[in-house]
Image (spheres, rainbow, N blue to C red):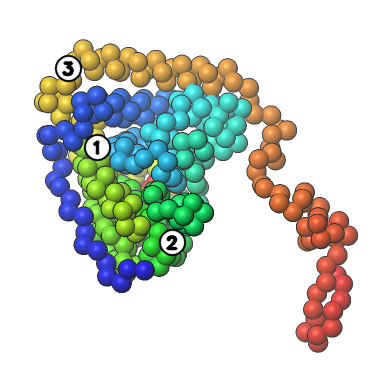
Amino acid sequence: MSQVAPPAVPTAGAGALSLPVSPTTALQWLRDMHLIREFEVRCMQSYQEKKIGGFCHVYIGQEAVAVGCVAAMRPEDPIVTAYRDHGHALARGMTSRACMAEMYGRVDGCAKGKGGSMHMFDRPNNLFGGHGIVGAQTPLGVGLAFATKYEDEVINGGKSRRVSLSFLGDGAVNQGSFYEAMNLSGLLDLPVIFIIENNGYSMGTAIQRGTTMSHDLCIKGRAHGLREATIDGMDVLSVYRDMKALVEWCRENSRPAIVDMKCYRFKGHSMSDPRKYRTREEEAHHESNDPIITLEHTLTHAGVLDEAKLAAMLKLVREEVREAIAFANASEVTPETELYKDVFVEPWGKYTGSSLPEFMGGATNACTFRATDGKEGLV
Ligand SMILES: Cc1ncc(C[n+]2csc(CCOP(=O)(O)OP(=O)(O)O)c2C)c(N)n1
Ligand SMILES: [Mg+2]
């Protein structure tokens, strides 16, 4: 375990004009961000048409975070996130079809329609959910980092080579599990990065009303010796550049980090949120800093994007999402017989209705107990 916290990663200002990647890659990021935006807009419509049930939290405004972070990682690096997860799934490579079918509760969804909006899961692309309990995914991120490190170092006898990303909202920083997760990651030298998608709100509570030191969330990781970075989450080029440096540092040193990713959600918390807790002026102010428009300006300025190219890109994106909706509509509604499949692993045999697993004779519905007087009996 390292005893001294490493220095913070220097963070460059937003809006850098030089492209840190090839024009093709930057255009791909623009396309990915447009895809997420279009997907979310159509999800909102489908929700109003009652095609989508349950909870639904859209990612509009935060697209640069998922796209920039995923671009900074390797495909084999695991990701785990909270319930606002459609953007992460699409950025990670899940097809629009599988994602939309999941939203619609259909058998062709990524989780056979059993998870829905909050539980996007994609094993081949190393996306480990989509989790609805606020903060619950942060220990899972630590577990993923432990597992990859153990596999790389102990089982394969090499160097730890994968970095795990654990996304969380600013509302989740006050969960106890987050502190346990950070402590363990520091103690065990685990290569995990906690990315706080700091959109300023936890449902209807503004961050400064519910969180201490809300101007600098990295401070939450300082006690655990985490490396830290504050990043402009409204600029995909900044996200990529700063995350790339951080991810590679964590990979090289097998150490954890924390990121205060400053961003804003343009829509309500979920589909039923009248947004009375903030002003329309505040929203307009942030919407004028739209990450998609910012990238479009940068690419136009750099001479790699023009109106015709953008129109062609948007046409393809709209077609893709329209086709995904048609696919979801045509897919079978997940039948009731699927309800209990793939839900629990049953290493000890099927649940017998007793307090003992099957291999211990669970069906007898009896177990021994030790009474306070030391005698054993049966219940
Ligand atoms: C343990 C727990 N407590 C409360 C809730 C209810 N809840 C759902 S979302 C949410 C707000 C979380 O806000 P944040 O972490 O900032 O994420 P954001 O919605 O901004 O992406 C709350 C309190 C929950 N799902 N789990
Ligand atoms: Mg939030």
Give the SS element for disc 3: loop
Q: Which mark is residue 374?
A: none
Q: Residue at x 24, y 54 (%)?
A: 229
In terms of secondary structure, where does tag 1 sit? helix
Among the two numbered marks 1 and 3 on one chain, the one whose residue lies closer to the N terminus: 1
Q: Residue at x 42, y 24 (%)?
A: 42
Which of 327 and 276 lies nearest the eye of the viewer? 327
Coordinates of residue 174 in the picture (x, y in percent):
39, 61
Distance Cα–Cα, label 1 vs label 2: 27 Å
Quadrant for residue 255, please give it.
bottom left
Camera sees residue 245: yes
Tell me the CA gap for discs 1 and 3: 19 Å
Give the vertical position of 203 relative to 122 (above or below): below
Question: Disc number at residue 306?
Answer: 3
Residue designated by label 2: 181
Question: Does the residue at mark 1 contact the one at mark 3 (Cβ under 8 Å)?
Answer: no
Q: Position of residue 99 (x, y in %)?
A: 49, 29
For label 1, the crowd category at 10 Å Cα-Cα, with few meaning under 14, some 14 to 19 and many 20 or more, is many
Q: Tell me which amino acid carries mark 1.
A: Val
**Pointer 3 local density, CA inside 10 Å: few below 14, some 14–19, many at least 20:** few
Residue under label 1, please give it: 236
Residue 31 location (% of width, % of height): 30, 25
Q: Earlier in the sequence, mark 1 or mark 2?
A: 2
- Is 56 above or below relative to 161? above
Question: As drawn, is 199 to the left or to the right of 237?
Answer: right
Instruction: Judge from the rendering whether residue 144 lies leftward or rightward of residue 221; answer left or right.
Output: right
**Ligand 1 near label 1 (Cβ, under 8 Å)?**
no
Image point (84%, 83%), residue name: 375
**Secondary structure found at label 2:** helix
- Residue 172: percent from left, percent from top: 40, 55
Mark 2 or mark 3, earlier in chain:
2
Q: Say which residue appears at 43% left-offset and 61% top-offset.
A: 181
